[in-house]
């Protein structure tokens, strides 16, 4: 079972669900994975750091791999930070097997928020 953080924003009726844990997409794609998750600010900052590290002559693959591991480990916190910057409010943490089940559970407990 996975845990999802449910955030409500002003612009959306349905919550934004952020899965807790390691992000495999970010582990393999790095900062591009953050962009695909919708974390634009963090993704662009991480991309700039990656490009600057690529310009240094002494940077080796272990440093790039370490950057990917750190970004993948903290993807949940980075996405949460960006959502809070945009005014999202954490409503609850929902345990579920997948994203659809988490949304269904959230809707069962927060039916008044949808009306």
Image (cartoon, rainbow, N blue to C red):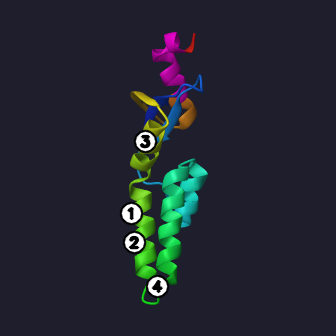
**Residue 101 within the magenta-colored segment of the rendering:** no
| Cα–Cα gap, marks 4 and 3 | 31 Å
Work out which residue is located at the far bottom of the displayed protein and give it: 57
Viewer-nearest of discs 4 and 2 = 4
Q: Quadrant of residue 115?
A: top right
- The answer to whether mark 1 and mark 3 are in CB contact below 8 A is no
Using the image as rendered, state which of residue 60 and residue 25 is in the foreground.
60
Using the image as rendered, state which of residue 92 and residue 101 is in the foreground.
92
Could you tell me which residue is drawn at 53 percent across and 37 percent down? Answer: 98
Query: Would you name the residue on which mark 4 appears?
Result: 56
Crowd class of label 2 (few under 14; some 14 to 19; many from 20; radius 10 Å): few
Can you see residue 27?
A: no
Could you tell me which residue is drawn at 43 percent across and 60 percent down? Answer: 71
In the structure shown, which secondary structural element does the residue marked by tag 1 occupy? helix
- The answer to whether mark 4 and mark 3 are in CB contact below 8 A is no
The mark that comes first in sequence, 3 or 2, is: 2
- The answer to whether mark 1 and mark 4 are in CB contact below 8 A is no
Query: Would you name the residue on which mark 1 appears?
Result: 70
- 47 shown above or below 4: below
| Cα–Cα gap, marks 4 and 2 | 16 Å
Percent across and percent down for residue 99 are: 54, 36
The mark that comes first in sequence, 4 or 2, is: 4
| Cα–Cα gap, marks 2 and 1 | 6 Å
Viewer-nearest of discs 4 and 3 = 4
Query: Would you name the residue on which mark 2 appears?
Result: 66
Q: Quadrant of residue 67?
A: bottom left
Query: Would you name the residue on which mark 3 appears?
Result: 80
Q: Which residues are magenta?
A: 103-113
Is the stretch drawn in magenta largely helix, strand or loop?
Answer: helix
Percent across and percent down for residue 91 are: 41, 25
């Amino acid at each position: 079972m996975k845990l999802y953080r449910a955030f409500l924003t002003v612009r959306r009726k349905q919550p934004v669900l952020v899965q807790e844990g390691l992000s495999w997409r970010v582990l393999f794609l790095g900062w591009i994975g953050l962009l695909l998750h919708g974390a634009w600010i963090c993704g662009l900052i991480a991309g700039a750091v990656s490009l600057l590290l690529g310009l240094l002559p002494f940077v080796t693959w272990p440093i790039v791999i370490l950057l990917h591991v750190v970004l993948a480990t903290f993807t949940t916190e980075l996405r949460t930070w960006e959502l809070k910057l945009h005014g999202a409010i954490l409503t609850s943490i929902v345990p579920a097997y997948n994203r659809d089940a988490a949304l269904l559970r959230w809707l069962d407990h927060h039916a008044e928020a949808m009306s």
